Image: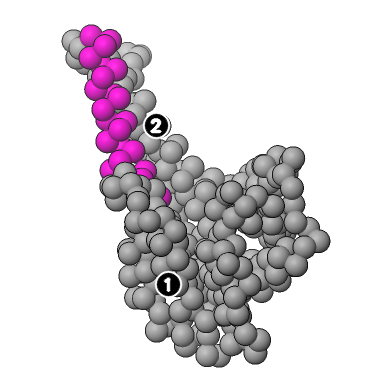
Amino acid sequence: MNPTVRPTPARAALRLGLAALVAALVGCVRAPVTDRLQVNVVPEKLLLAVGRSTYTEMLQGQSLSTKSADGAVLKRVGQRISRTSGRPDYAWRFNLVDDKDTLNAWCLPGGKIAFYSGILPVLENEAGMAFVMGHEVAHATAHHAAERMTQQLALLGGMSALYLAVDRRTELTDRQKNVMMGALGVGAQVGFILPFSRKHEKEADIIGLMYMSRAGYPPEESVEVWERMEALSGGRSLPAFLSTHPSHAQRRANLREWMAQAKKRYQRSALREDTLRALWR
């Protein structure tokens, strides 16, 4: 009879690493447009259900511009952009929240999108709205929420295994262990989680640029949107290494790298109406 082998912290960490590797290999997919390899182990059905319920909760009690001219423009732009995304299976929803003090737009899994009226003067025209709409649609089609959840799960598992190893194999006090793990957590946040968030924002800009071009909107307006955004912010921003978003200058540079390709798509599908006419000031 073989003696019972007790699992050691090293074996536990090895098993966790092997499980993460298998999950990563199974969950590898490609992002649209950029073709970036992604690791995603979160089932889409789960995220779609979360998106539906969270969207209802987030809009509850908000004043929605459902019958306004601005709301109609938002839905028209949203429908045009979403048709270029290749996800007709999503139950797309577009709502304008009547809140002039909030400069924001967001998207939940499954294509649940909201704009706040405070962002309209920065968008200025329908083409500007099309770019930001494309950016939000891209977050949904590139499964950025699922990818972030996968990262968080992997990070949590790794930190837990490390704490177990330190707890059993060192003579550190509880206070010393907590300080060390706290420092490692900050390092992981700054060195891994935040940069990956910036990568998602950059990718959403690029995919959104292509979506707006396919839908017939002039892609050059994407750069103009970030110029207006920078002017409004007065140049104030967090240091790049602590920001979850790229700088305005970085975003413009990223867009210009893809502009030639975007213009070709725009030329094939340009809308006849004037989408650069100022609608909001």
Q: Is residue 223 visible?
A: yes
Q: Residues within 10 Å of mark 2 (few under 14, many from 20)?
A: some
User: For numbered disc 1, what is the local secondary structure?
Assistant: helix
State yes or no: residue 188 in magenta.
Answer: yes
User: For numbered disc 2, what is the local secondary structure?
Assistant: helix
Identify which residue is drawn at 42% across, 43% down: 151
Name the spot of residue 97 as percent of width and height, x first.
68, 52
| Magenta extent | 173-198
Q: Amino acid at mark 2?
A: Gly
Predominant secondary structure, magenta span: helix
Name the spot of residue 187 as percent of width and height, x first.
27, 36
The residue most toward the left is 171
Which residue has dot 2 on it?
Answer: 157
Q: Nearer the viewer, residue 18 or 101?
A: 101
Identify which residue is drawn at 73% across, 63% down: 71
The residue most toward the right is 67
Classify 178 as above or below 147: above
Classify 10 as above or below 27: above
Q: Nearer the viewer, residue 195 or 172?
A: 195
Q: Amino acid at mark 1?
A: Val
Would residue 89 appear left or right of 125 to someone viewing this image?
right
